[in-house]
């Protein structure tokens, strides 16, 4: 073959594949016809000028034969971003099992007479990251069903299932109050956040309308924004006075009249008191009067359980990985510690269990650094080689692999990959965990080739400035290449 013609064809293919990362692209039709061509095409993608200042590591392995199809810098330590959730969710499934449930219990002490509870109501949580206001409303209805109309006592929250650390090591202070950095707690509700919705008023120059969901007195609002003229620029800023350590929501700027406004999800400070305040407000909605206050404490040994709410681990793992929920990762890491070790759950002890579990997959516990469960921290360091060993190890655990595999976002279908690799062979095929923090883009998971061979892959790219989009497009192009590979075409 003419060398110039061969290079032209290769360059053309790379261009086609790179553009296949966009949501409105054509299917890449030509299958990859040899292992050599496969490696050359990946090298050509990574030869783009955007990769010159960037560190890139990668490894692709056949699960059936353990053959390494591609490898680049796979032993270099890199920031995993949310690829860290692969480790956290794998350990949770291995140690807790797929039948584990997060349980939130409501109990009381004292006595019930003439529709009055002469005692306290207790809530004890186990870190359920999926608990919602609807769950608290269910607890209130349980009390109502017992005929209780008044509680002569307090609502007490027991958060002792976890230790007192509420935020991750190495998390950026100025990331507050982003919902990506919610405070963790054994008593979590609504992902320890509120939704703030701002819409223009009917009068230009007047204050826009601010709604907090769920509606609660736990949050205050300072609204200095104005409704601007139609078609003007939306300059709304929605935040919380995090620097002052308060739960005051601030709304500033201008929102155009006749526009849809803006919504932000904001973290709350003190998730336990948030939980208890919402519980009290749910009691009020069903006309149960509380004479006491809300406070933290522990459930006495002679308390009587009234109701409990169970949340299976599968919903947590799926939500954690599909949408990359950080609270799920942090709470599950602490719950893992509490369940296995029988003491207040801590991130440190949860990480020790992760390392013990990975050691069973042949991973040296001293070869990586893990300081949180979600990958938010820039202190976290892993390698592509580690990710591959983890993916291989989980594939061999047939009793939990299906749930692990199902929990990963599917290219072009759902989660954080819903808009990626559409109209390529990777769509509805590639299952992988994304990872993005400042200067980092990661993708690791599984993909099936054109002739049905399942691959495990890991791609870690870091030290870039600006948008991660060019690196995601490259990852998508490589994902399409893997899905197009057909051994019988060699």
Image (spheres, rainbow, N blue to C red):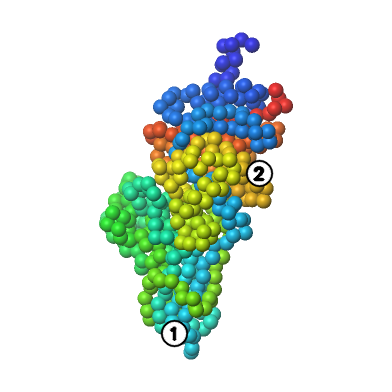
Q: Where on the picture, by quarter, is residue 205?
A: bottom left
Task: Decide if residue 413 is on the left or right side of residue 134.
Answer: right
Mark 1 falls on what kind of element? strand
Q: Nearer the viewer, mark 1 or mark 2?
A: 2
Compare marks 1 and 2 and give the one earlier in the sequence. 1
Would you name the residue on which mark 2 appears?
Answer: 396
How far apart marks 1 and 2 lie (CA) works out to 55 Å
Q: Residue 185 location, x and y as percent? A: 43, 60
Taking the spot 42% from the left edge, 50% from the top edge, the residue there is 180
Q: Nearer the viewer, residue 274 or 15?
A: 274
Task: Decide if residue 312 is on the left or right side of residue 470.
Answer: right
Instruction: Tell me the quarter of the image containing the N terminus.
Output: top right
Mark 2 falls on what kind of element? helix
Q: Where on the picture, by quarter, is residue 53?
A: top left
Taking the spot 52% from the left edge, 51% from the top edge, the residue there is 353
Residue lying at the far top of the rendered structure: 2
Q: Is residue 277 above or below residue 34?
A: below
Instruction: Tell me the quarter of the image containing the C terminus.
Output: top right
Residue lying at the far right of the rendered structure: 488
The answer to whether the residue labelled 1 contacts the one labelled 2, judged by CB atoms less than 8 Å apart, is: no
């Amino acid at each position: 073959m003419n060398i110039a013609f061969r290079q032209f064809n290769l360059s053309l293919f790379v261009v086609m594949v790179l553009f296949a990362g966009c949501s409105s692209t054509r299917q890449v039709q030509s299958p990859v016809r040899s292992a050599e061509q496969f490696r050359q095409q990946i090298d050509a993608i990574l030869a783009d000028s955007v990769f010159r200042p960037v560190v890139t590591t990668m490894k692709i392995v056949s699960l059936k034969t353990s053959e390494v199809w591609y490898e680049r810098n796979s032993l270099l330590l890199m920031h995993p971003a949310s690829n860290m959730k692969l480790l956290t969710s794998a350990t949770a499934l291995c140690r807790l099992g797929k039948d584990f449930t997060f349980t939130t219990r409501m109990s009381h002490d004292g006595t019930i007479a003439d529709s009055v509870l002469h005692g306290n109501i207790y809530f004890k949580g186990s870190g359920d990251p999926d608990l919602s206001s609807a769950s608290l409303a269910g607890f209130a209805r349980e009390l109502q069903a017992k005929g209780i109309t008044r509680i002569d006592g307090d609502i007490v929250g027991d958060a002792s299932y976890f230790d007192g650390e509420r935020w991750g090591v190495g998390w950026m202070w100025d990331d507050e109050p982003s919902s990506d950095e919610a405070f963790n707690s054994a008593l979590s509700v609504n992902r320890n956040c509120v939704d703030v919705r701002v819409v223009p008023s009917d009068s230009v120059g007047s204050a826009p309308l601010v709604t907090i969901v769920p509606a609660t007195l736990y949050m205050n609002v300072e609204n200095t924004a104005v409704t601007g003229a139609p078609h003007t620029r939306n300059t709304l800023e929605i935040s919380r006075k995090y620097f002052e350590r308060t739960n005051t929501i601030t709304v500033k700027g201008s929102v155009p009249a006749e526009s849809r406004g803006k919504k932000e999800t904001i973290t709350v400070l003190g998730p336990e008191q948030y939980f208890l305040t919402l519980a009290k407000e749910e009691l009020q909605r069903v006309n149960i009067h509380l004479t006491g206050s809300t406070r933290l404490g522990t459930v006495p040994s002679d308390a009587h359980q009234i109701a409990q709410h169970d949340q299976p681990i599968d919903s947590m793992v799926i939500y954690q990985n599909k949408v990359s929920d950080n609270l799920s990762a942090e709470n599950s890491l602490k719950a893992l510690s509490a369940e296995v070790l029988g003491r207040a759950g801590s991130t440190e002890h949860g990480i020790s269990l992760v390392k013990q579990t990975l050691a069973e997959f042949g991973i040296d516990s001293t070869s990586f650094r893990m300081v949180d469960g979600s990958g938010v921290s820039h202190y976290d360091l892993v390698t592509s080689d580690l990710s591959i060993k983890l993916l291989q190890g989980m594939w061999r655990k047939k009793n939990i692999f299906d749930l692990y595999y199902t929990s990963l976002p599917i290219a072009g279908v759902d989660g954080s990959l819903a808009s990626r690799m559409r109209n390529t062979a990777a769509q509805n095929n590639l299952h992988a965990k994304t990872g993005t923090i400042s200067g980092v883009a990661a993708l690791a998971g599984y993909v099936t080739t054109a002739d049905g061979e399942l691959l495990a892959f890991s791609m870690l790219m870091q030290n870039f400035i600006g948008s991660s989009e060019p690196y995601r497009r490259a990852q998508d192009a490589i994902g399409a290449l893997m899905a197009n590979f057909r051994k019988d075409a060699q």
